[in-house]
Structure formats: structure tokens, C-alpha cells
């Protein structure tokens, strides 16, 4: 997308830029971390936009064994 076709955020109208992010989503195995995911991110409100191909790829990856498992810290707020 060139500068003349700059995308605007659907929610706030802010500028949207292409980034690679770390994305967490629920899978049948629990919460999964996807690293290096291409998406478009609003610089104002942070809304993320994924292409249909990116969503399909994450779904494909979620249906296979992960190459790495990590433990996340847990905290009791109360």
C-alpha cells in the first residue's frame, strides 16, 4: 500500500501502518502466542487488522503441534 492509499482506522479514523506483531489468541489447546504476525495497526487506538490469509495461517498453525512451549507468570489481583 503506498502513501496515497493510506488506510484509516475504521473505529477512530487514525493512521494505520503495517507492522509485524506478537499476537495471542485462544486455540483448542489454550492461549497461543504467534510471533512475527503481519498486520495493520492503528497508531491512535491500537486496533489491529489481519488479512484473511493471515487469519487462515494462524488457524493452520493452531491445528499443529507448537514448536515451543512457554510458561506464563500468573498473578492474583485481589
Image: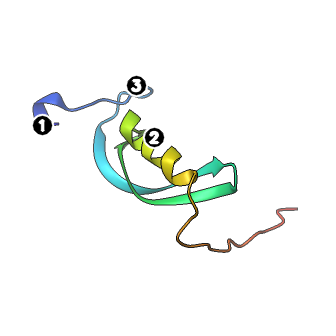
- Indicate the position of residue 3 as horizontal and vertical percent values: 12, 36
**Residues at marks 2 and 1, CA–CA distance in whole angstroms:** 23 Å
Total numbered labels placed on residues in the image: 3
Tell which circle, 2 or 1, labels the residue nearer the N-terminal end. 1
Q: Quadrant of the N terminus?
A: top left
Q: Disc 1 on helix, strand or loop?
A: loop
Residue located 88% across and 62% down the image: 78
Disc 3 or 2, which lies upstream in sequence?
3
Residue indicated by mark 2: 55
Crowd class of label 2 (few under 14; some 14 to 19; many from 20; radius 10 Å): some
Which of 27/25 is in front?
Answer: 27
Q: Residue 59 versus residue 6: which sits nearer the camera? A: 59
Q: Position of residue 66 (x, y in %)?
A: 56, 65
Mark 3, mark 2: which one is toward the viewer? 2
Q: Is residue 20 visible?
A: yes
**On the image, numbered disc 1 is attached to which residue?**
2
Distance between the alpha carbons at the discs numbered 3 and 2: 19 Å
**Disc with the residue nearer the chain's start (1 vs 3):** 1
Q: Secondary structure at mark 2?
A: helix
Identify the residue at image location x=62%, y=74%. 70
Using the rendered view, name the quadrant where residue 13 is placed. top left
Q: Which mark is residue 10?
A: 3
Crowd rating for badge 3 (residues with CA inside 10 Å; few <14, some 14–19, many 20+)? few
The residue nearer to you, when weighing 13 against 26, is 26
Q: Position of residue 48 (x, y in %)?
A: 44, 41
The image quadrant that residue 49 belongs to is: top left
- Per the rendering, the mark at residue 36 is none
Task: Give the number of the mark in front: 1 or 3.
Answer: 1
Amino acid at each position: 500500500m503506498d502513501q496515497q492509499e493510506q488506510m484509516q482506522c475504521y473505529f477512530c479514523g487514525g493512521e494505520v501502518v503495517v507492522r509485524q506483531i506478537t499476537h495471542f489468541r485462544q486455540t483448542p489447546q489454550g492461549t497461543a502466542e504467534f510471533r512475527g504476525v503481519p498486520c495493520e495497526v492503528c497508531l491512535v487506538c491500537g486496533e489491529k487488522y489481519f488479512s484473511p490469509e493471515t487469519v487462515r495461517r494462524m488457524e493452520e498453525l493452531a491445528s499443529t503441534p507448537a514448536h515451543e512451549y512457554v510458561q506464563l507468570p500468573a498473578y492474583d489481583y485481589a
